[in-house]
Image (cartoon, helix red, strand yellow):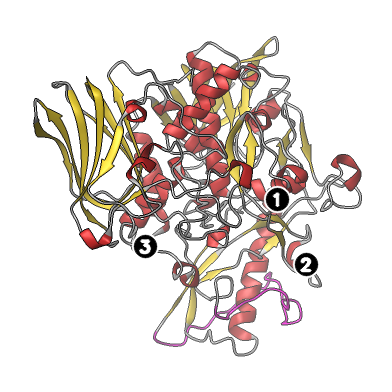
Amino acid sequence: MTILRNHGLTCDVLVAGGGPAGFPAALAAARCGASVILCQDRPVLGGNASSEVRMHIVGADASGHRGRELETEAREGGIIEEIRLETAVHNDQRAASMLDLILYDRCQAEPNLQLMLNTRVVDVELQGERIALAVAERQSTEDRFQIGARIFVDCTGDGQMGVSAGAAYQHGREGKNVYGENLAAEHSDGKTLGSTLLFQARKHDRPMPFVAPPWARKFTEEDLMFRPHSMPGVNGGLEYGYWWVEWGGELDTIKDNEAIRDELLAILLGIWDHIKNDGDHGAENWALDWFGFLPGKRESRRFMGQYMLVEQDLTRSTPFDDAIAFGGWPIDTHPPAGIDAVDERPCDQRMTDYVFDIPLRSCVSPGLPNLMFAGRNISASHIAFASTRVMATCAAIGQGVGTAAAYAAAHNMDSADLADDPAAVLAIQQRLLRDDAYLIGVTNCDPCDLARQAKVSATSQQTCGEADNVISGQTRAVFGKGGAPPDRAHPGLHRWMSDPADGLPAVLELAWERAIQPAQIELVFDTGMYRPLTLSHSDAFMERVIWGQGQPETVRGYRIEGHVSGAWHSLLNVTDNYQRRRIHKLEAGKPVDKVRVVVEATHGLDHARICEVRVYEADAPVWCHSP
C-alpha cells in the first residue's frame, strides 16, 4: 500500500534532471515548439552551480585562458550566455540564490515548459525497446506521476532514468589498451573523480574563534603542500574554497554518497581548523559563513552511445558532421584518492590546441530508440569526460540535445535515427546557430533569413569590421590561438564595428531589391566572449570578470526603423539592452525595402558592434531543411 496519489501526464519531451545540462535542454526544446516537462529532484535548478553546491560555471574558454580579444572567443553562447549575462546584470551582490531564481524565472516564463521541482524520475515502463513512460515521485506532496513522452532525455548526471530503461553504461577509468589513449590509466579500474564540498567565509572586525568537532579530520602543512590555502589567488583565498576538498573517487559515488558526504564534512572542517588554529594563516578574524551538505559530484555513470568520444577526438579536434556543441576545457583529471593523495597534485590539466566538436551520436542511445542524454553522463571515455564534464560545456550539450529532441518530436522521429538523416542534422544545426550556439565550421545557410539577400551598408565602419560581416554566417572570431582548427575557423571578426571617430549614433542598413514584410528581426551583439564571465564566490576570480553591468562592447540603446514609401518609420526602440541575442517580433505593417539599426549607446565602448542581423517574414518555418 502507498499513500502516493497517481497522476497521468503527457508531453513531447521529458527531461529528467534540472542541472547545467537539463535546464538548457528543456528550455531549448520548449523554445523550439515542443511541449516539455522538466523533473528536478532538488528544490532549485542548477545542479553544481546552484546555491546548494556553489561551484562557478566554467567551460571551453578555460576561464579566459583560451581567450584573445577579437581573435579567440570561446565562451559557449546560446542559453548559457543568456544566463551569464542576466546574472551579471541582476546579481551584482553575487548571491548564490539569485542564480537559482534566474533559472527558475526562465522556466516560468516559457509557456511550453512545465517545471516539476522536488520530483525525481524513479523508473520507466517500456513497450518493446521504446520507453513508453517515466515514473516520477514527489514525496513532499505525496504524488506519483506517470509521464508519457515522445522523447526522453536523461540529464540526471547519475543516469537514473536511462539505467532504469536498461541503457548500457560504463563506470570508472579505461586502461590505455581500451581506446589507445595516451592519458589513460595503465589498466582499467572502477575509480572516478571524487566529489567536493565547498564553503564560504567572511572577515569580521574582531577575532572569531573556531572549535572543530571531534570527528573533524586533522591536517598539517605537509598534507596540503600541493593544495593552496589562505593565500592570494583564485584557488587560495579564505572567502571561498576549495575545489580540491575532494574525496570518494575510490568508492561508488552513487551508492556511497552518504558516506562520502560525511567524510567530506570531516575534511572541510578539518581544513578550516588547520587554517584557524594551526599556525598563522591570517584567518584570526575570519569565520565560516556557509558550507555545503550536498556533495558536488564530478563523475559516476557514463552512457554508451552511438559514438564514444575519446581523447584523440579532443586533441585532434576531430570534425563530426553531426556536431551539436563544442568543448575546450582542459583534459582535467584528478587523483581518485582526492585529498588523501598527499604526494600528488590535485589535478592534471592538459589544454587542447583547439576547441573540439561534440557529436549528437554521443548523446543518443543505440539500444533505446527514444532515449537521449546530456551532461556529464554522455558517451565519452573517462579521459574525454575529464574535459566535457564542466558545466558550461554540459549546458552547450544540453541546448544541442534539447533542440534535437524537439526536432525528433516535431517530425515523429526517433532520436536514434537523427544522426543518419542529413536533412535532420542540417535543420538541428541551423536552429542552434539561429539560437546563438556555436558549431565549429558551420555557418548560417538558412534560405528563410532575408538578411542574407540584402545589401548591407553603414554610416561608418572599421577595417575588418565591415558592415556586411553581419551576414557572414558566423558570429564570433575563432581564428586565434586556441580557437577553431585553421581549416574550419572562417577567419575574420564577423561583426560590424563603426568608426569611433564618427561617434554615436551609428547606423547599419539592410536594403532589398524587392519589398519585404518583416515579422521578426533577430540581432546578435558583441558581449566580449574572449573574457571569463561567470558567477563566482571567489573574490580573486571576480577580479577578471566584468560584473554588475552590461559588458562594455554590448549595444545598450538602439532603435530599428523601416523604410516605407520613401520615408523612415520607427519599428521599435530599446533603451537598456545587455543581452547578446535579441528577438524582436514586429506588428503587421506595410512592406519595407530597407531596415536600419540605429545604435545610440553602448555599455562603455566608443563605437557600435553588431555580430549578426537576421530578418524573417511571418511564414518562416522553425526548421531549415535546405541551404
Residue 175 spot, x, y in % from top left: 88, 46
Q: What element does badge 2 sit on? A: helix
Q: Magenta segment range? A: 205-232
Q: What element does badge 1 sit on? A: helix
Q: Amino acid at mark 3?
A: Trp
Q: Is residue 627 magenta?
A: no
**Mark toward the start of the polypeptide (3 vs 1):** 1
Residue receiving disc 1: 386
Location of the N terminus (image quadrant): top right
Instruction: Give the foreground label among 1 and 2.
Output: 1
Residue receiving disc 2: 340
Residue receiving disc 3: 547
Q: CA distance from mark 3 to mark 1?
A: 29 Å
- Whether residue 215 appears in this view of the structure is yes
Closer-to-camera residue (491/277): 491
Instruction: Give the foreground label among 2 and 3.
Output: 3
- Identify which residue is drawn at 79% across, 69% down: 344
